[in-house]
Image (cartoon, rainbow, N blue to C red):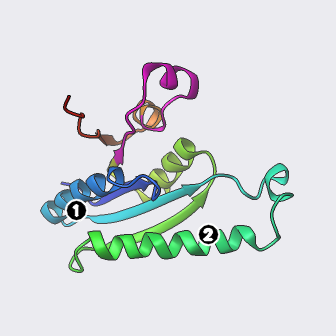
Amino acid sequence: MYKNILVPMDLNDKGFSDKAVEIAVWHAKNSDAKIHLLNVLPGVHMPMVSAYFPKDAAEKMKADVKTKLNDFAKTHIEASLKYKTYIAEGKPYTTILKYADRLGVDLIVMPSHKRSKVNKALLGSVASKVVENSPVSVLVVKPKPVMK
């Protein structure tokens, strides 16, 4: 059914990305698809930002994130499945859509953070922007509700 599955990830949010990858792995197993894990970093090469960091800081950060993403993949994706990891810079939702197009994905599986309505109105939601603008199917993984 699917050939290429993109999973945009935030390694800082424990639990959200794990669940999205778990679902992507299930789909990959059942359709012999390749999984593409993507971590989008903020634009650290922008002049306004880069002026505050040593010249090699961005490359060191990318290398560190790449190591963490590869370790995550080895832990969460079975060795029998095909996968690849990517580190990109830019605005999250536009970068996700660019990679989806570039990689020819036919499914995006992404976590959605539990945010209040006020935060969504002020900040916007990466997941909602991807859903709104994606030409391919997007499966949004919501966090489990907290039982009161």
Q: Which residue is mark 2?
A: 62
- How crowded pointer 2 is (Cα within 10 Å; few <14, some 14-19, many 20+) is rated as some
Q: Residue furthest bottom?
A: 79
In percent of width and height, residue 129 lies at: 47, 33
| Numbered disc in front, either 1 or 2 | 2
Q: Residue furthest front?
A: 148
Left or right of 13? Residue 140 is left
Residue positioned 76% across, 58% down in the render: 45
Residue positioned 37% across, 55% down in the render: 14
Q: Amino acid at mark 2?
A: Lys
Q: Residue furthest left?
A: 30
Q: Is residue 67 above or below residue 93?
A: below
Disc 1 to disc 2: CB gap under 8 Å = no
Give the SS element for disc 1.
helix
Q: Which residue is mark 1?
A: 25
Residue 81 placement: quadrant = bottom left
In percent of width and height, residue 46 lies at: 79, 53
Q: Earlier in the sequence, mark 1 or mark 2?
A: 1
- How crowded pointer 1 is (Cα within 10 Å; few <14, some 14-19, many 20+) is rated as many
Q: Is residue 104 magenta?
A: no
In percent of width and height, residue 48 lies at: 84, 49
For the image, the number of numbered tags is 2
Q: Amino acid at mark 1?
A: Val
Alpha carbon separation for disc pair 1 and 2:
25 Å
Residue 50 placement: quadrant = bottom right
State which region is magenta. Answer: 110-127
